[in-house]
Image (cartoon, rainbow, N blue to C red):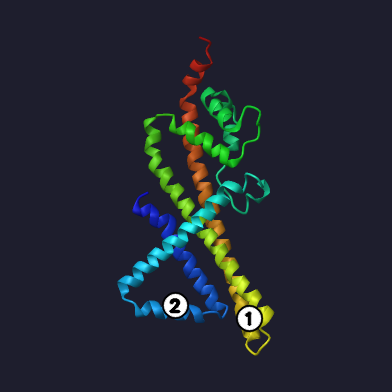
Amino acid sequence: MTDVKSVLRYVLPGLGFVIELVLLLHLAGRGGAISELLKDMGDASGLVAAVGAVVAAGGIGFLLSIVHFALFDTFGTRWDWLNSCYPSPTYTDLLESDATKEDKRIQRIRERIAGKDKKTLTPQQTRQILREFNHGAGKKWYKEHVDRTGNLSDTMHSVGAAYVGSMVACAIVLLCIAHETWDALDAWGLHFYWGGLWAALIGAVLTLCHWCTYRNTVRNVQSLVGAVSRRALEESGGERGQTSTPN
């Protein structure tokens, strides 16, 4: 993985998580610990602080990416009705089309991945089938689309990790609010309540924005891969006729 892809997939989502968490904690009246941490970082040299921040963001982003991929392959596979909460590209309509059913090679790939008796494909299986079919097409025009689809896929996974980070930041702040609301009945409890209310509201809005961005990116990936796959199916029409002819 190149340095640019590593920054896109890990460092940027990690930085986004840290910034959002600091903002929400500050709004919730829990900025004391953050201020102390920033003060300690300010005492260190600029280079050390910068390198430490990048390494920490990359580590956090890597953990967020692990959660993202787990949700990416689970939602819509076991719980179809939750796919709207965490969408992933699916190509069921394309694989159920007449052109696909007439293509012998893609049918062999489908039987190997999903089995002969399975009629309903999961989103993950549809991606595996088209990935293998397209990579085996061997067309020059497809190779020209590899970089484009790869870059868009990296963007999708980066946005997905940022979406996970936003949900985690909101969960942390909500836990702080619940803990303080349960224990704090002193003079500053009412102040924290209003701060926590604003933090929860802004956190929900930020999470919704992340979800919309991630959903649109998934749709873009699905549209591009679908278009490339349809062209590959159209150009394999002659191969379908040769394959279906008895020897």
- How far is disc 2 from disc 1 in space, using C-alphas? 25 Å
Q: Residue furthest top?
A: 247
Q: Is residue 94 above or below residue 75?
A: above
Depth check, front residue: 171 or 211: 171
Q: Identify which residue is drawn at 50% across, 58% down.
A: 64
**Of the image marks 2 and 1, the number of the one nearer the N terminus:** 2
Q: Is residue 37 above or below residue 150?
A: below
Q: Position of residue 146 (x, y in %)?
A: 40, 40
The residue pinned by badge 2 equals 37
Q: Would you identify the image quadrant in which residue 85 lies?
A: bottom right
> Residue 186 appears in which quarter of the rendering?
bottom right
Residue occupying image coordinates x 39% and y 30%: 139
Where is residue 13? Give x, y as percent.
46, 60
- Percent position of residue 40, x then y: 40, 79
Describe residue 187's horizontal placement relative to residue 232 as left or right. Answer: right
How many labels, in total?
A: 2
* Residue 77 as seen in the image, left or right of residue 1: right
User: Residue shown at 51%/20% (left/top)?
Assistant: 240
**Looking at the image, is 28 positioned above or below residue 162?**
below
Disc number lying in front (2 or 1): 2
In the rendered image, the vertical position of residue 149 relative to residue 18, given as above or below: above
Task: Inspect the image, locate mark 2, and give the three-letter code of the amino acid beneath it.
Answer: Leu
- Give, as a three-letter code, the residue at label 1: Trp
Mark 2 residue element: helix
Residue behind mark 1? 194
Q: Quick check: marks 2 and 1 in contact, CB under 8 Å?
A: no
Give the number of the disc on residue 81: none
* Residue 191: image location, x then y, percent: 62, 85
Within-10-Å neighbours for mark 1: few <14, some 14–19, many 20+: some
Q: Residues within 10 Å of mark 2 (few under 14, many from 20)?
A: few
